[in-house]
Amino acid sequence: MRWKLKLIRRRLFSRATQRMHVRGALFWPLRWLVGAVVLGLSGALALWAFEWGKDIAGLDRAAKQQVIRLQGELTEAQARLGRAQAVADTAESLLKAGEAAQTRLAEQLRQVEAENLALKADVGAFERLLPSAAGQDGVAVARFDVEAQAPGRLRYQALVVLGGRARQVFAGRYELTLSGTLHGQPWTMGPSGNASPLELTQYRRIEGVFEYPPDAVVKTAQFRVLDAKGAVRASEQARL
């Protein structure tokens, strides 16, 4: 009988122990889950308390106001920078325009100086010629220059003056004649058709271009002034 009781106790004790062991294994995951939920709620509560306290203290509003103020200052600085850049661009444009105008003025000044030198040379030749021509009421070629620019193209310049004390007008014409060789033979070329008209009171500078056969070799050029009747009043010759 005692043996049977002991056997029953052992069975009951072993079953109770097995049941308690199974219940303990199933309870721990639930405990971890509950702990995680509690921790999450605590963190959320702490964050809400921090934000609420910061709002009460006015820190968030001050930061927002400072950001708005800084944005306004940045916008104003950008506007000032834009205005300064516009002024700089305008100044640069005016400077470039001034430099271009200065360059043009310098070029015009050089042209005027060259024209003045040529005019002085013409006046000097005219003054030298006037004493000999005074009282004769004659026409003279004070200067005659020629320059070969290209084969078959000759540029000439002449200064024609009118002597005499009384103011008078000369009406006539002038012509240019070239002499040289063409294909080894003597060659001469005068004005084709009528000569160019000429009218002057004291002096006149004449310049132009004379074209001739490119194969011709020009050795001399003669400039002649003729009156209305065709009589030669003055002539000058230049060599190339």
Image (cartoon, rainbow, N blue to C red):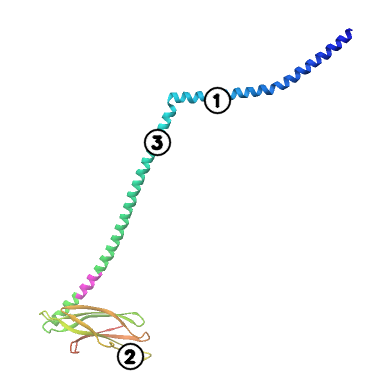
Whether residues under marks 1 and 2 lie with C-beta atoms below 8 angstroms apart, the answer is no
Residue 117 within the magenta-colored segment of the rendering: yes
Q: Amino acid at mark 3?
A: Leu
Q: Which residues are magenta?
A: 114-122
Q: Is residue 164 left or right of residue 49?
A: left
Q: Nearer the viewer, residue 49 or 203?
A: 49
- Up the image or down, 207 lies above or below 22; here it is below
State whether residue 25 appears in this view: yes
Q: Amino acid at mark 1?
A: Ala
User: At x 18% / y 83%, what residue is drawn?
Assistant: 140
- Up the image or down, 184 lies above or below 21; here it is below
Q: Main secondary structure of the magenta part?
A: helix
Which numbered disc covers residue 70? 3
Nearer the camera: disc 1 or disc 3: 1
Q: Residues within 10 Å of mark 2 (few under 14, many from 20)?
A: some
Q: Where does residue 57 sit, x and y in percent of width and height?
A: 43, 24
Q: Which residue is mark 1?
A: 44
Q: Amino acid at mark 2?
A: Trp
Q: Which residue is mark 2?
A: 187
Secondary structure at badge 2 equals strand
Residue 88 within the magenta-colored segment of the rendering: no
Q: Quadrant of residue 156?
A: bottom left
User: At x 65% / y 24%, what residue is drawn?
Assistant: 33
How many numbered discs sit on the rendered protein?
3
User: At x 70% / y 21%, what residue is drawn?
Assistant: 27
Q: Quadrant of the C terminus?
A: bottom left
Q: Where does residue 216 sit, x and y in percent of width and height?
A: 36, 87
State whether residue 223 appears in this view: no
Q: Closer to the N terminus: mark 3 or mark 2?
A: 3
Whether residues under marks 3 and 2 lie with C-beta atoms below 8 angstroms apart, the answer is no
Q: Where does residue 221 sit, x and y in percent of width and height?
A: 28, 85
> How far, Cα to Cα, is label 1 from label 2?
118 Å
